[in-house]
Image (cartoon, rainbow, N blue to C red):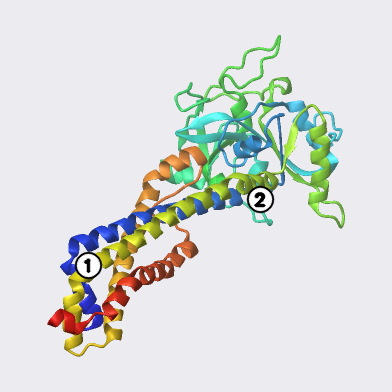
């Protein structure tokens, strides 16, 4: 019989003890895998948002991090709205009714407004303009692509575009209609919008958004800014051609900016100057997504992930000690078997190797079960994480490099745990146990 066969026979002879030892290790590995996968997915999700084709967000005064989380990652709540007149300060004269350049127009290459506050079956609804997908990019100049249909037109008031994750989850197609709800999923139902395009997968927060024409968004009940003397806005009829909402009744939640790059200078230099100017004023605040997310990761996510990883790693170490205790406890039971092996011609090295192989088999069995349980745990809590953090997780979510490192780690722990009982078996007195 081979050394592997002997080790396997020893495990089967103490099946209950061996099973409980492997299970303890499996639970520790489960926690480690879940921590690695969830932590990696959260970090990747935040990093993906920082690579979108705009480098600044302007919104109402308040928390810059909240502004970034709401506008970029479609989580958290909007701070407040800013007037339409403030948004126009970022536009060139060709895009303004008075024909004059806005106060910040010279520092801006692209300004895209977004309006938020509605939902559709758990997904955030974003009112915006066609420029969102025509002029903004996914970063590094990569344009948005459509898996089906096209971008909506600014003159098609009740058209919408769905992110890839929304379309896949809800089963909507080009030509289907959907009706957002006001403020929450159980809020008042708005007029229907028509799906004209479905975005190709981007692996960014854009995949989780429902994007509608801002003009149609404004015409929904409760979306017009109350102005003394202005008529109440009524939802447009399906066959009507409503007039756009007057500028005095318009507000935007945030403005996505791609700052201009001076000749021979990086865009970050213009962004720094623009951010300082806006923040010193009273109208709003400017936040740089990359800066805010780096601070979030450095201050909260990475330290928390490290603490959880240390705790779960200690669980694995304690489980490895369980292998040690279990094998030491059974060392007396195996002493006679070891003596018989030695009497039949087995070398001391063979005895040592058999015990170590047994420890490694227990560790690998517990590791494999723990790896499977870890991914099942991630899949089970995936919907909760998606709701609270906007991160999509499933059974196939993985942290490949970190998970691969678990294999040599478990083998090393198993060898260390089995070393003491292996040395005890190595030194077994044959004459004593066969006398």
Is disc 2 in contact with disc 1, using a CB cutoff of under 8 Å? no
Please tell me whether residue 9 is drawn above or below residue 30 in the rendered image. Answer: below
Please tell me whether residue 303 is drawn above or below residue 126 in the rendered image. Answer: below
In the rendered image, the quadrant that contains the C terminus is bottom left
Q: Quadrant of residue 370?
A: bottom left
**Which residue is depicted at the point 30% across and 62% down?**
325
Extreme residue toward the left, this view: 435
Left or right: residue 142 compared with residue 179: right
User: Residue 361 at x, y = what percent?
Assistant: 29, 70
In the rendered image, the quadrant that contains the N terminus is bottom left
Q: CA distance from mark 2 to mark 1?
A: 64 Å
Please tell me whether residue 401 is drawn above or below residue 431 in the rendered image. Answer: above
**Which residue is depicted at the point 33% across and 71% down?**
420
Front residue of 268/401: it is 401
Q: Earlier in the sequence, mark 2 or mark 1?
A: 2
Q: Quadrant of residue 17?
A: bottom left
Q: Which mark is residue 178?
A: none
**Which residue is depicted at the point 38% across and 70% down?**
416
Left or right: residue 63 compared with residue 432: right
Q: Circle 1 is placed at which residue position?
A: 330
Left or right: residue 301 compared with residue 313: right
- SS assignment at label 2: loop
Front residue of 27/368: it is 27
Front residue of 12/116: it is 12
**Which residue is depicted at the point 41% across and 42% down?**
383
User: Residue 343 at x, y = what percent?
Assistant: 17, 87
Q: Which mark is residue 137?
A: 2
């Amino acid at each position: 019989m081979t050394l592997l066969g002997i080790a396997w026979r020893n495990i089967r002879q103490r099946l209950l003890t061996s099973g409980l030892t492997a299970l303890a290790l499996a639970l520790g590995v489960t926690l480690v895998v879940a921590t690695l996968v969830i932590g990696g997915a959260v970090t990747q999700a935040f990093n993906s948002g920082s690579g979108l084709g705009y480098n600044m967000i302007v919104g109402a005064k308040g928390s810059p991090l909240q502004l970034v989380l709401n506008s970029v990652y479609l989580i958290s709540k909007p701070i407040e709205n800013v007037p339409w007149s403030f948004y126009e300060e970022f536009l060139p004269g060709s895009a303004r009714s008075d024909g004059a350049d806005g106060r910040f127009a010279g520092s801006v290459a692209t300004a895209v407004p977004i309006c938020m506050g509605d939902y559709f079956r758990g997904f955030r609804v974003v009112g915006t303009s066609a420029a969102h997908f025509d002029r903004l990019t996914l970063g590094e100049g990569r344009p948005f692509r459509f898996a089906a249909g096209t971008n909506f037109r600014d003159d098609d008031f009740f058209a919408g575009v769905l992110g890839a994750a929304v379309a896949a989850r809800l089963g909507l197609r080009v030509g289907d209609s959907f009706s957002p709800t006001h403020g929450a999923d159980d809020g008042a139902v708005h007029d229907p919008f028509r799906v004209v395009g479905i975005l190709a997968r981007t692996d960014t927060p854009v995949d989780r958004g429902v994007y509608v024409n801002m003009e149609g968004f404004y015409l929904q009940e409760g979306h017009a800014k109350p102005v003394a003397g202005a008529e109440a806005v009524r939802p447009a009829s399906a066959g009507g051609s409503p007039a756009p909402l007057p500028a005095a009744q318009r507000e935007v939640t945030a403005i996505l900016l791609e700052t201009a790059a001076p000749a021979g200078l990086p865009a970050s230099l213009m962004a720094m100057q623009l951010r300082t100017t806006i923040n010193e004023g009273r109208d709003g605040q400017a936040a740089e997504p990359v800066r805010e997310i780096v601070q979030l990761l450095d201050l909260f996510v990475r330290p928390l992930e490290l603490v959880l990883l240390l705790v779960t790693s200690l669980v694995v170490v304690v489980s490895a000690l369980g292998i040690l205790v279990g094998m030491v406890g059974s060392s007396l039971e195996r002493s006679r078997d070891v003596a018989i092996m030695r009497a039949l011609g087995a070398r001391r090295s063979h005895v040592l190797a058999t015990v170590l192989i047994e420890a490694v088999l227990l560790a690998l069995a517990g590791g494999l079960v723990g790896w499977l349980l870890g991914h099942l745990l991630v899949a089970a809590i995936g919907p909760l994480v998606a709701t609270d953090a906007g991160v999509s997780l499933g059974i196939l979510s993985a942290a490949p490099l970190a998970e691969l490192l678990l294999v040599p780690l478990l083998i090393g722990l198993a060898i260390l745990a089995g070393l003491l009982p292996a040395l005890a078996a190595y030194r077994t007195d044959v004459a004593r146990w066969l006398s």
